[in-house]
Amino acid sequence: MRQAKTHCLLAALLLPVFMLCGFIRPIDARTSEQGKKTFQGTIVAVGDSLTAGYGVAEKDNYPSQLQKRLLAKGLDYEVINSGVSGETSSGTLSRINWVLSLKPDIIILEIGANDGLRGIDPNLTRENILKIIALLQKKKIITVFAGMRMVSNLGLRYTHAFHRIYLDVAKDTGVIFMPFFLEGVATNPALNTSDGIHPNRKGYKIIVDNLLPYVLKAIDLREKTSE
Amino acid sequence: MLHLRFIFRELILSAKQASIFVLCVALSLATMVALNTFRKNVSHSILGDARSLLGADIRIHSHYPISRGIDKMVSDLENHHDIEATKTYELYSVIRPLSGMRTLFCRLKVVGPRYPLYGKVELRSGRPLSQVLSPGKILVEPEVLGRLGVKIGDRVHIGEATLTIADVITHEPDHPVNIFSLGPGIIISAADLKRLQLITKGSRVEYSILIKVGRNDAAINKLADRLKQVSQPAQERITTYKTSNSGMKRFFDNLFFFLSLISIFTLFLAGIGMQSSLSALLREKQKTLAIIKSMGADSGFLFRQYFALVLCLGAIGSMAGVAAGLILQHFLPKVFQGLLPQGLTLTVSVFDIVEGLAIGLLVVVFFTFLPLYDLRNIRPVAIFRHDRTGTGRGILFYPVLAGGFLLLTVLVVRQLQDLKIGLYFMIGTTALIVVISLLTRVLLAAIARLQVASLGMRQAMKSLFRPGNATRSIIVTLTSALSVLLTIFLIQTNLSATYIESYPPDAPNLFFLDIQPDQKTAFANEIGGKVELFPVIRARLVAINDRPVKQQTSRRRGDSLTREFNLTYRETLLSDEAIQEGKTLFTKDASGKTPLQVSILDTVAEMGDMHVNDILKFNIQGVPMKARVSSIRTRTKSRLYPFFYFVFPTEYLQHAPQTFFAALHIHKKAIASLESRIATAFPNISFINMADTAAELGRLTQKLITIVNFFAGFSILAGALIMVGSIFATRLARVREAVYYKVLGGGTRFVLAVFIYEHLLLSLLSSILAVVLAQAGSWGLCRYLFDISYSPHLVVSCTLVLITSILVIAVGIVSSIGIIRQKPAAILREQNGE
């Protein structure tokens, strides 16, 4: 509570300064539901079961682990898990407005795996993702976009077309792009659950290790643009 | 020691009683033998289905290549010809015709040379798989032809290979009925595996080794254990055909247990019938036996003679029963032709026959001991006086009773194959008989005190208490028989309702997933008519009454509370739902609005120990929501209909991110073309084709209905005959009274009236008592043993009371009609000449 008061005081003091400078953007004091912690920003992890953390405990999924790492680094960002197991890109597009009601500053978008696993036409997946990112960019939300590869049993032609989705989208939209979400984790039995597809706790730790630099980049960008 | 002429004469003189006795023995054995051998054969065949479903006795599967340890063990065993084994690989892939832009997402099954180990893959051409499937050739499900626009003989691209369509699959035995398929199936020979180049690092493949042991369960389980020891437990799953489908297994266990119960019940019934007919026989002969005793024969002599008689009758009955059972079993497949599995082989071992005979004799001995032991109470003075024979229990009484009880328990436990349940059953049945005896005593005492105006009725009631009456024994027998019959019926119908009728023929067989909100109307139009769309909102349950939902403590009923759930919204119950707790689905507040609340399903309520008015906290993709539980619903129908754990009122979730799914029943032949149309118009929609699953389940359940009905019916028939026999056995005393009434001036009509009243009293007492006990027993068994819901079927119960009364009266009158109508003098002369 004392922190909130200090923040408010600061805001009250700095506001006229900023307004004088023509910047009318106070730093929002963000409280979580019970008003226990205030955050300086919100990151929403949007995705499928790899985001939702299918097969692992709540505290071991990647958004939870990412949260801990950010706090440890002194970055008071709230990481909200908005993953839906089994979701395809069409589903994400349908629900993106609901996600925006959380007022995210940064969104980590990890989607498309289920499109591939169901053999959906890669062109449709690409269109959906482009629409999602266009919407996010319109709202000035900084996007970290995670690339995906498809299981090789679908055949070279399909898997090639699938991977191109992500490369093309990254190039066309200029988002912060992590080439492969499961880098170093996929196909390794020790890092995945018994279904061979979903990472376990150790797997998600490595994913967060790989993801962190991109998230930091996004935070950096956000801090810069909000100044 | 044995006076054969005496025994022989006794046999001839009391032929009627003797034949009833033999009939009881025969009936009980016939049921048991038929049931046991049939059950073994049916079990073999139904479990054979289970083998077909699994495709093996043992199946090893993993999402990673099978580990070296298992691989080596399997090849070693194969080399020693101990087992037959084959490998399969299941994966999804996209296939393309040689020309054109179409592609199809398919389920590929790459199979080794000896596939299938069990069951048969049926092809359109009718040829066996081994003839058709060879390198370069594939077998496809009909959908593939329709969706890709290809035909038999065309070639398609699969992975890096080009393969020819050789035939069409019409039935695949080991496509597990509870696995959803996201695309039509294709069978490919393992010789083509390398050419496909689809199984590399980074592939999602289900690797399996199917093993056929071809020996008994013990050998299978032993091998499964050995395999588990060298397996990678985190990755590899080893299942046997018995453990693989636990839902089905549970059903079969219940079924066979129920059938065993029936056979035991029938045996007990017959035993009671035996005892009562023997008692009646000996009672008839009281005077004769008293005379023999007065001539110097001691109790031991009489006991030996009659014991020999009983054994002789028992032996005849046993042999007749066993023979009848075997013959009956032989006719069963013919009677149920087409409904029973093809090629049901009926094997009878010598062991079964000997076992049947031995059981028969044992049962006879136990149930006839009491009447025989009572022989020593007949005193010579009974020639002169109609003394009520003493009912003193001798030294031998309790030990023999205990010994017999023990023997019977062993028999029961063996039949039910479960020690605990066997003991409970024995205790329960004994308690039943004791309770019936006590209640009968109470009821009879009450009747004795009743004042009734009608003379006929009064005489009828008094005659129930005539000296040397067998009223209590008749009522106990009748009640036991009726309560058992009704219990069988009630349990059978409740089992049916839960397991068998749960798969109606019009159950949905095609599911569409991931329909987006803006596609609803277009989708419905494409289907061509009204289709019900269920909204699905993915969310997690976070807390119950502020208690966080934790992973470890929340696994129950094979499900977990920490997984993502599908929430939905609507205003009414589904057609197969009913409210179990709470008055209505949702409650309105004082101002007539519907506040935020949620209706939950009883299964999830049980998992989380949730009740009406609990507060549940959900996390809907990051957005929290708290709702009060307004009601608990239960499902009254099949598991094939869609169901939802959590239902909200429309206004709170209609703007939440959602997809829709549709459940339809479509004729199997129309499915492929419908899927094509939908796939073209809405590439994001997935479908799950359950047509084959539904058909398979329908077939199985039909089979089982027949079997259960047959055995229940047979037992009911046997029980009815025993009941008739015991009425018949005790008619003599009544006949004598009829004569005296006539002598005293009563007309035929009066005598008939007394008869009818007496039988009516007997039957009403017995049947009402039986209904009460049967309802209590069935409820207990369904609730605690079978763990299924219970419905009392009161109409049937009342019908039973009615039918029993009619039957008892009819039998009583028919068996005595000749005597009633005769002139009294003739009877008296006959009787004195005895």
Image (cartoon, coloured by chain):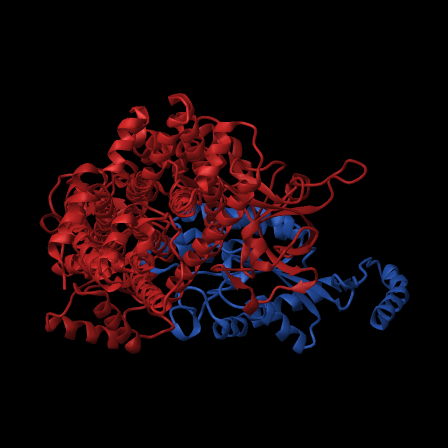
Chain colours: A blue, B red
Furthest-front residue in this view: B384
Whether A192 is drawn above or below B766: the answer is: below
Assign the C terminus of chain B to one quadrant of the image. Answer: top left
- In this rendering, position of residue A55 left or right of residue B699: right
Which residue is more in the foreground, B198 or B340? B340
Residue B54: quarter of image: bottom left
Report whether residue B101 is seen: no
Which residue is more in the foreground, B780 or B804? B804
Report whether residue B576 is seen: yes
Which residue is more in the foreground, B674 or B773? B773
- In this rendering, position of residue B359 left or right of residue A65: left
Assign the N terminus of chain B to one quadrant of the image. Answer: bottom left
Which residue is more in the foreground, B427 or A75? B427
Whether B209 is drawn above or below B797: the answer is: below
Q: How many marks?
A: 0
In the rendering, at what x and y percent does residue B510 appear?
Answer: 39, 39
| Rendered residue at 27%/70% (across/down) | B66
In the rendering, at what x and y percent does residue B262 appear?
Answer: 33, 50
In the rendering, at what x and y percent does residue B701 appear?
Answer: 32, 43
Residue B738: quarter of image: top left
In the rendering, at what x and y percent does residue B591 appear?
Answer: 81, 37
